[in-house]
Image (cartoon, rainbow, N blue to C red):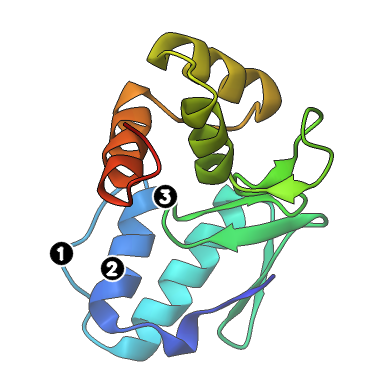
Amino acid sequence: MNLNLTTYSTDDLVALYNAVAKRPVKKFDRRSVAIERAGNALAEAHDATFEDGIVIAPDGKRWDAKARTFVSADRKKHAASSPVMGKRLGIGARIADLLIAGKDTKAIVETIHAEFPQSRATGKDVSIMRSKLRNQGKLA
């Protein structure tokens, strides 16, 4: 997925430029200069190309706005096919199933990380789901 810099505000362009530039700036005089400098800096830092205000992503990559970088396009968020359940489900649903089955927090976190390798779930996520299930009356 390409990055269209013409849709960004001048402040966002400064932030993008400063994320990859060797010499950060506080502001640009004109928006057109900001687009040009940010586009060239991003293209150089990520082996991409820049034309007409658009940074063209390298093959197999997409723009991750939160990380302000290009990441692998095949990277999935957190939902995956569970080998145990045999169907597509989210981590929250799996945590709920394990809580209802009576597993403890440590065992649940270990199971989640085994089934969903990209998960960043912690004991806090398990606690939140436990409270939610108790409020719904599904857990004692």
Where, by quadrant of the figure, is residue 63 drawn? bottom right
**Image x and y of residue 120, in percent:** 47, 30
Q: Nearer the viewer, residue 3 or 29?
A: 3
Which image quadrant: the C terminus?
Answer: top left
Q: Amino acid at mark 3?
A: Val
Q: Residue furthest left?
A: 26
Number of the label disc, if any, that sits on residue 26: 1
**Image x and y of residue 87, in percent:** 81, 46
Number of the label disc, if any, that sits on residue 14: 2
Sequence-earlier tag: 2 or 3: 2
Q: Please, is residue 121 above or below residue 57 in the view?
A: above
Q: Nearer the viewer, residue 108 or 23?
A: 108
Residue 101 lies left or right of residue 61; in this view the side is left
| Residue at 36% in and 39% down | 129
Which image quadrant: the N terminus?
Answer: bottom right
Where, by quadrant of the figure, is residue 139 drawn? top left
Q: Amino acid at mark 1?
A: Lys
As measured in the structure, the alpha-carbon distance from the residue carrying label 2 to the one carrying label 1 is 7 Å
Count residues near mark 1 (Cα–Cα under 10 Å), then give few for <14, some for 14-19, many for 20+. few
Q: Nearer the viewer, residue 80 or 133?
A: 133
**Image x and y of residue 47, in percent:** 69, 52
The answer, for residue 75, to whether it is visible in the render is no
Q: Which residue is mark 3?
A: 20
The local secondary structure at tag 2 comes to helix
The local secondary structure at tag 3 comes to helix
Q: Please, is residue 97 above or below residue 66 in the view?
A: above
User: CB under 8 Å between callouts 2 and 1?
Assistant: yes
